[in-house]
Image: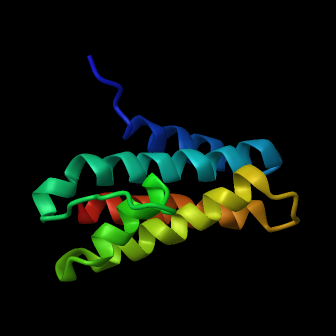
Amino acid sequence: MPFAWADYLILAITLAANTADEASLRSSISRAYYAAYHAAVDKAGTHGVTIVRTAGTGVHEACWLAYQTVPRVVSIGVTGDRLKVRRHKADYQQINLNWAKEAATAVAEAQLLLSQL
């Protein structure tokens, strides 16, 4: 049976509740992103979106750019790209942010994106 990527959103919500633990909050952001990303990839065809990776473009960037080229789903591409940037900060950058707020925002954006799919 294939992995249910939507379960990552459930995990993201659980992790976001642990506001005293930066690792949980950063992980929440990452899980929310991947729930949204994989759902977007799975549903691309149903929205007339063709994901094509070109030289110099990563597969994640290609996904969100492809959504942004289809007028009725532009907002999915914009939200997905915003989540990608937030995930990159959470996964790779040694910066001080209000991670509880960032996690709550990431979860809300992922929920919105999934509802639009």
114 over 3 or under it: above or below: below
**Residue 62: percent from the left, percent from the top?**
39, 62
Q: Quadrant of residue 111?
A: bottom left
Q: Residue furthest bottom?
A: 71
Name the residue rendered at 39%, 66% in the picture: 64
**Residue 32: percent from the left, percent from the top?**
51, 51
Q: Residue furthest top?
A: 1
Q: Nearer the viewer, residue 57 or 111?
A: 57
Q: Is residue 28 left or right of residue 50?
A: right
Name the residue rendered at 18%, 79% in the picture: 72
How was this image coloured? rainbow
Q: Quadrant of the C terminus?
A: bottom left
**Residue 78: percent from the left, percent from the top?**
41, 76
Name the residue rendered at 52%, 58% in the picture: 107
68 over 2 or under it: above or below: below
**Residue 51: percent from the left, percent from the top?**
28, 58
Q: Is residue 86 left or right of residue 51?
A: right
Q: Quadrant of the N terminus?
A: top left
Q: Residue furthest front?
A: 55
Say how many tags the image has: 0
